[in-house]
Protein backbone atom coordinates (compact mmCIF):
# COMPACT_ATOMS: atom_id res chain seq x y z
CA UNK A 1 0.00 0.00 0.00
CA UNK A 2 1.00 3.61 -0.40
CA UNK A 3 0.43 5.50 2.85
CA UNK A 4 0.00 9.24 3.13
CA UNK A 5 -0.56 11.53 6.07
CA UNK A 6 -2.99 14.39 6.57
CA UNK A 7 -6.22 15.43 4.96
CA UNK A 8 -7.83 13.16 2.40
CA UNK A 9 -6.36 13.83 -1.02
CA UNK A 10 -7.20 12.54 -4.44
CA UNK A 11 -3.92 10.77 -5.13
CA UNK A 12 -4.32 8.39 -8.04
CA UNK A 13 -1.81 6.53 -10.13
CA UNK A 14 -1.79 4.07 -12.98
CA UNK A 15 1.92 3.32 -13.14
CA UNK A 16 4.85 4.09 -10.90
CA UNK A 17 5.99 6.64 -13.49
CA UNK A 18 2.79 8.62 -12.88
CA UNK A 19 4.01 9.25 -9.30
CA UNK A 20 6.90 11.47 -10.49
CA UNK A 21 5.21 14.71 -9.33
CA UNK A 22 5.14 13.48 -5.73
CA UNK A 23 7.78 13.18 -3.02
CA UNK A 24 8.10 9.42 -2.54
CA UNK A 25 9.60 7.73 0.49
CA UNK A 26 11.04 4.28 0.87
CA UNK A 27 12.96 1.96 3.14
CA UNK A 28 16.51 0.90 2.33
CA UNK A 29 16.69 -2.71 1.17
CA UNK A 30 12.99 -3.15 0.44
CA UNK A 31 11.93 -5.16 -2.61
CA UNK A 32 10.67 -2.10 -4.47
CA UNK A 33 13.97 -0.16 -4.66
CA UNK A 34 14.74 -1.32 -8.21
CA UNK A 35 11.15 -0.71 -9.39
CA UNK A 36 11.16 2.86 -8.08
CA UNK A 37 14.56 3.50 -9.65
CA UNK A 38 13.44 2.13 -13.04
CA UNK A 39 10.35 4.37 -12.87
CA UNK A 40 12.66 7.37 -12.52
CA UNK A 41 11.31 8.37 -9.12
CA UNK A 42 13.33 10.47 -6.71
CA UNK A 43 13.03 8.60 -3.42
CA UNK A 44 13.87 9.72 0.11
CA UNK A 45 14.98 6.48 1.78
CA UNK A 46 14.87 5.78 5.51
CA UNK A 47 16.75 3.01 7.34
CA UNK A 48 13.58 1.42 8.79
CA UNK A 49 9.78 1.55 8.76
CA UNK A 50 9.35 3.80 11.79
CA UNK A 51 11.89 6.35 10.52
CA UNK A 52 10.07 6.41 7.17
CA UNK A 53 6.70 6.97 8.85
CA UNK A 54 8.20 9.80 10.92
CA UNK A 55 9.44 11.42 7.69
CA UNK A 56 5.95 11.05 6.26
CA UNK A 57 4.43 12.80 9.29
CA UNK A 58 7.07 15.55 9.09
CA UNK A 59 6.12 16.22 5.46
CA UNK A 60 9.45 15.14 3.98
CA UNK A 61 7.58 12.70 1.75
CA UNK A 62 4.04 12.54 0.43
CA UNK A 63 3.69 8.83 -0.29
CA UNK A 64 5.29 5.84 1.37
CA UNK A 65 5.02 2.28 0.01
CA UNK A 66 4.74 -0.02 2.98
CA UNK A 67 3.11 -3.33 3.83
CA UNK A 68 -0.29 -2.40 5.21
CA UNK A 69 -0.05 -4.56 8.33
CA UNK A 70 3.46 -3.33 9.16
CA UNK A 71 2.43 0.28 8.57
CA UNK A 72 -0.70 0.05 10.69
CA UNK A 73 1.25 -1.68 13.48
CA UNK A 74 3.80 1.14 13.70
CA UNK A 75 1.13 3.81 13.38
CA UNK A 76 -0.98 2.25 16.14
CA UNK A 77 2.07 1.81 18.38
CA UNK A 78 3.74 5.20 17.85
CA UNK A 79 1.03 7.55 16.58
CA UNK A 80 -2.03 6.11 18.31
CA UNK A 81 -3.56 9.55 18.86
CA UNK A 82 -3.23 10.35 15.13
CA UNK A 83 -4.21 7.04 13.52
CA UNK A 84 -7.11 8.66 11.68
CA UNK A 85 -4.68 11.06 9.95
CA UNK A 86 -3.03 8.20 8.06
CA UNK A 87 -4.57 7.03 4.83
CA UNK A 88 -3.74 4.65 2.01
CA UNK A 89 -4.21 4.96 -1.71
CA UNK A 90 -7.06 2.93 -3.12
CA UNK A 91 -4.79 1.05 -5.52
CA UNK A 92 -2.27 -1.18 -3.74
CA UNK A 93 1.37 -1.17 -4.81
CA UNK A 94 1.41 -4.96 -4.81
CA UNK A 95 -0.80 -7.80 -3.68
CA UNK A 96 0.95 -10.83 -2.29
CA UNK A 97 -0.60 -14.09 -1.19
CA UNK A 98 0.48 -15.86 1.96
CA UNK A 99 1.03 -19.58 1.63
CA UNK A 100 1.95 -22.54 3.75
CA UNK A 101 4.50 -24.80 2.12
CA UNK A 102 5.25 -28.35 3.17
CA UNK A 103 7.90 -30.47 1.50
CA UNK A 104 6.53 -33.47 -0.37
CA UNK A 105 9.24 -35.50 1.35
CA UNK A 106 7.87 -34.60 4.78
CA UNK A 107 6.07 -37.64 6.26
CA UNK A 108 2.30 -37.35 5.67
CA UNK A 109 2.68 -33.95 3.98
CA UNK A 110 -0.71 -34.02 2.27
CA UNK A 111 -2.47 -35.10 5.47
CA UNK A 112 -0.74 -32.28 7.35
CA UNK A 113 -1.86 -29.70 4.78
CA UNK A 114 -5.39 -31.08 4.82
CA UNK A 115 -5.54 -30.83 8.64
CA UNK A 116 -4.09 -27.32 8.52
CA UNK A 117 -6.68 -26.16 5.95
CA UNK A 118 -9.55 -27.78 7.87
CA UNK A 119 -8.57 -26.05 11.11
CA UNK A 120 -7.91 -22.74 9.37
CA UNK A 121 -11.49 -22.82 8.00
CA UNK A 122 -12.80 -23.46 11.53
CA UNK A 123 -10.78 -20.56 12.93
CA UNK A 124 -11.98 -18.22 10.16
CA UNK A 125 -15.60 -19.21 10.82
CA UNK A 126 -15.33 -18.32 14.50
CA UNK A 127 -15.76 -14.99 16.26
CA UNK A 128 -12.20 -14.91 17.58
CA UNK A 129 -10.82 -14.56 14.04
CA UNK A 130 -13.09 -11.59 13.34
CA UNK A 131 -12.06 -10.05 16.67
CA UNK A 132 -8.37 -10.38 15.79
CA UNK A 133 -8.91 -8.74 12.40
CA UNK A 134 -10.85 -5.90 14.02
CA UNK A 135 -8.27 -5.43 16.77
CA UNK A 136 -5.48 -4.95 14.23
CA UNK A 137 -7.52 -2.97 11.71
CA UNK A 138 -7.29 -5.62 9.03
CA UNK A 139 -9.94 -6.12 6.38
CA UNK A 140 -10.59 -9.63 5.14
Image (cartoon, grey):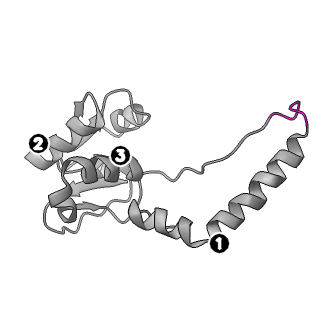
Q: Marks 2 and 3, how far apart in space? A: 16 Å
Label 1–label 2 contact, CB within 8 A: no
Q: So how many labels did they put on this image?
A: 3
* Frontmost residue, 85 versus 136: 136
Q: Can residue 43 be seen in this view?
A: no
Asked whether 105 falls inside the magenta stretch, the response is yes
List x then y, in percent, for residue 26: 28, 37
List x then y, in percent, for residue 55: 15, 41
Q: Mark 1 points at which residue?
A: 125
Rendering quarter of residue 35: top left
Q: How crowded is mark 2: few (under 14 residues within 10 Å), some or many (20 or more)?
A: some
Which circle's residue, 1 or 2, is located before the other in the chain? Answer: 2
* Frontmost residue, 93 versus 134: 134
Q: Residue 26 carries which label?
A: none
Give the residue drawn at x 41%, y 37%.
32
Give the residue drawn at x 32%, y 62%.
89
Considering the whole magenta stretch, tell me its main secondary structure. loop
Label 3–label 1 contact, CB within 8 A: no
Which circle's residue, 2 or 3, is located before the other in the chain? Answer: 2
List x then y, in percent, for residue 120: 69, 59
Q: Marks 1 and 2, how far apart in space? A: 43 Å
Q: Name the residue under label 2.
A: 60
Question: Which portion, as a residue range, is magenta?
Answer: 103-107
Q: Can residue 110 be seen in this view?
A: yes
* Frontmost residue, 120 versus 139: 120
Q: Residues within 10 Å of mark 1 (few under 14, many from 20)?
A: few
Q: Which mark is residue 66?
A: 3
Q: Is mark 3 on a helix, strand or loop?
A: loop
Left or right: 125 in relation to 86: right
Q: Is mark 1 on a helix, strand or loop?
A: helix
Say above or below: 106 vs 71. Answer: above
Amino acid sequence: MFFYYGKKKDYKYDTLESLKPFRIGGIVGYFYEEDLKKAGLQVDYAPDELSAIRKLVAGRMELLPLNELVGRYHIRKTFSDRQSDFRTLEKPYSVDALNVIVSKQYPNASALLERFNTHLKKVKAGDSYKAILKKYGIGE
